[in-house]
Image (tube, grey):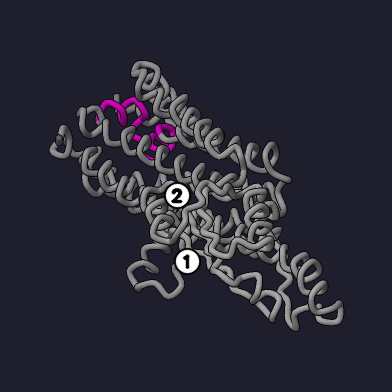
Amino acid sequence: MAAALTRLTARQAFVRSALRECARLRADRWDLAMVTWIPLLAMALFAWMFASGIPRALPIAVVDHDGSSTSRALVRLLDAAPGLHVAARPTGLPQAWSSVRALETFAVVYLPAGTERETLHGGATVFAYYNASHQTSGQATLREIGSVVQAANPRIALDAVALTRGPAAVRPPPLRVQATVLANSARSYEHFLLGLLFPALLHLAACLAMVVALGRELRDGSAGDWLCDCGNRLLPAIAGKLAPYLLLFTTYGVLSLVWLAGIRGSGVAGSAWLLLLAQAAMYLAYAGIALLLVGATRNMGTSLSLTGLYAGTSLAFSGATFPVQGAPLFTQVWTQLLPFTAYVRLQAHQLDLGTAWTASLPSLGTLLLFALLAGGAGLLLFGRGARDPAAWRQR
């Protein structure tokens, strides 16, 4: 038997392990589902949910205590804006607050008495209150309200001020801000959210699947048979076992980029090849993490729990949704300990900003470093457990 084992090359051991894992997946329909149609279905649901691209017809309440032609025109402009819908016209602010608390509206616009008069004598204030507990919706309504009021200013100046005080009284403001969007010019929530949700979903599912693949060999006490079947060649055996998952999830990642950039977007601003390489490197990094967790705990249940804690927090701590600059030291350290952070940075460089490919090499190197360090330590720890019957069958 020993002589037969030594005759296996690394390639043969890799192929045997990969075929063994594929056979195991075919034998368990739910494990197969977790790495095939379930991730694809989740991606399709995400794509459908955010297909509108940007929020539209967000409900607001308008309290008009002025009742003038100027205030009525402004209310019509607010309701005509694509992103807004005047859903309530309460008589006072207390009634408006009630609509916000009931989540019937996300913002309140208040036009106090004398708005038109103050407009004619130098300037008036339109008050906008938004619900920051629903930050995305609240800020979207606030931005739309600001855009409507800013767009209405020239019209009000021409129609009201010029007629009452003469054309000479109409003067442009001394300072203006000209804002230009550098990336995601459509300000698409679909592009922003799916660009994060797709890799967040896939890397978590991939890591969980690889933890199960490795942990089951220890839990079921089959690690010895598996290694014997692969000629007792640990590295090719592990590589072959994880290869189907790396191939599947890298393919899903590529499909997500095709949808995001090719079908729903305007293409890749930078290097498409570097972006695809980063996809593979991210899943390779999480393969190393999975190997490390199973090797360190020797318990599949514990490893799955730690995976949920580690990979499940990636989106929140990646710095893409909330800035981490100025955050507590723990937050900044934890952010750097996540491969997802490096991938998101590289994706922003190449997908949206068109950054020079050399500027993204440190992020790619970080992903490969995760794979090397975590995978190397995991290989040592898992190898000990796989060859130690005392570490098997732990529940």
Q: Which residues are magenta?
A: 224-241
Q: Nearer the viewer, residue 183 or 384?
A: 183
Q: Give the residue type at disc 2.
A: Ala
Category of crowding for the residue at label 2, using alpha-carbon neighbours closer than 10 angstroms: few (below 14), some (14–19), many (at least 20): many
The image quadrant that residue 318 belongs to is bottom left
Q: Residue 64: x percent and y percent?
A: 55, 60
Amino acid type at mark 1: Pro
Residue lying farthest top? 27
Nearer the observer, 246 or 32: 32
Query: SS at mark 1?
Result: loop
What secondary structure is marked by label 2? helix
Q: Position of residue 72 (x, y in %)?
A: 65, 57
Mark 2–mark 1 distance (CA, rounded to whole Å)? 24 Å
Disc on res. 331: none
Q: Which residue is mark 2?
A: 285
Q: Residue at x 84, y 78 (%)?
A: 166
Residue at the image position 67 percent from the left and 39 percent from the top:
264
